[in-house]
Amino acid sequence: MGAKSRLALCLLVASGLGSCAGLDIRPVTKPMAPASLPQYKVGDKFVFKVAIVEDRQEVVAVTETTVIIKSSMFGNLTQYKDFGNPESWTGGFTQAYTTRPDRVVSGLFPLKVGNRVAGSGSFTYNSTGTYARTCTVEDQVRVTVPAGSFDAYQIECKMKYTYPSGIDFQIDRIWYAPEINHWVAINRHSRMFVLLSYDKM
């Protein structure tokens, strides 16, 4: 079984409330309250595992709408607090990826099941093109990762990339835990990250 097939199987298991690669997903024991926009502080730290690599992340700057994270894998990772908008990164050992939304999307937060937002913009990665992004809050689940067990919102973000040479589709899935104001697992650009540890300021 190839890497893409294993990832597809992992996501299938996860969506069916099972376990895979350090990620165990079960139903919540009681309904969650709507989750407000995440709050970060400079110095917040998160360590994720992706395959056999550890990605060490530290918040280095916070604005009204974004958080900038120094990542050992992605370099400077700029993430909108409302992650209905796509991230950008540069300076890591992965190729730079830059997005420019046509407008900053809001409305995914406060998180509750059924919330849905859509946006579009341009991107640069290998070549340049445009994207269309739709994010939907799918479920409330109990997620266990190496860092612990958390009640989390499960969010699916679909990306359609239009290049000069054709079209590509990606699906990111995010498990966001209000308890720590961050995701505890994320499938980002076909890479599955699970939280090993965290230190909130």
Image (cartoon, rainbow, N blue to C red):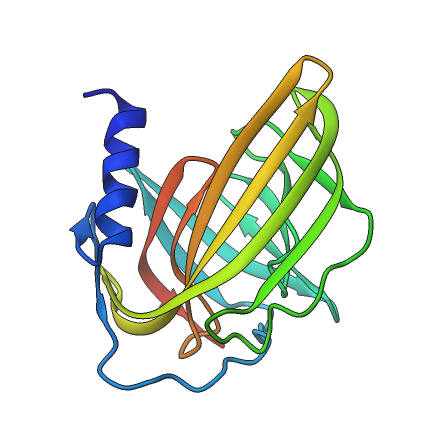
Query: On screen, 192 above or below 115?
Result: above
> Where's residue 52, x and y in %?
26, 36
Q: Quadrant of residue 180?
A: bottom left
Residue at the extreme right of the image, as rendered: 102
On the question of residue 73 being in view, the answer is: no
Query: On screen, 44 above or below 74?
Result: below
Residue at the extreme top of the image, as rendered: 165
Image mark count: 0
Residue at (74%, 27%) from the top-left corner?
129
Residue at the extreme front of the image, as rendered: 114
- Residue 101 placement, left or right of 52: right
> Where's residue 114, x and y in %?
50, 69
Q: Quadrant of the N terminus?
A: top left
Q: Between 179 and 91, which is closer to the camera in this rendering?
A: 179
On the question of residue 137 being in view, the answer is: yes
- Residue 113 placement, left or right of 126: left
Q: Quadrant of residue 142?
A: bottom left
Q: Between 129 and 87, which is closer to the camera in this rendering?
A: 129
> Where's residue 165, x and y in %?
68, 12
Residue at (72%, 40%) from the top-left corner?
99
Residue at (30%, 69%) from the top-left corner?
141
Q: Between 18 and 24, which is closer to the camera in this rendering?
A: 18
> Where's residue 135, x and y in %?
56, 55
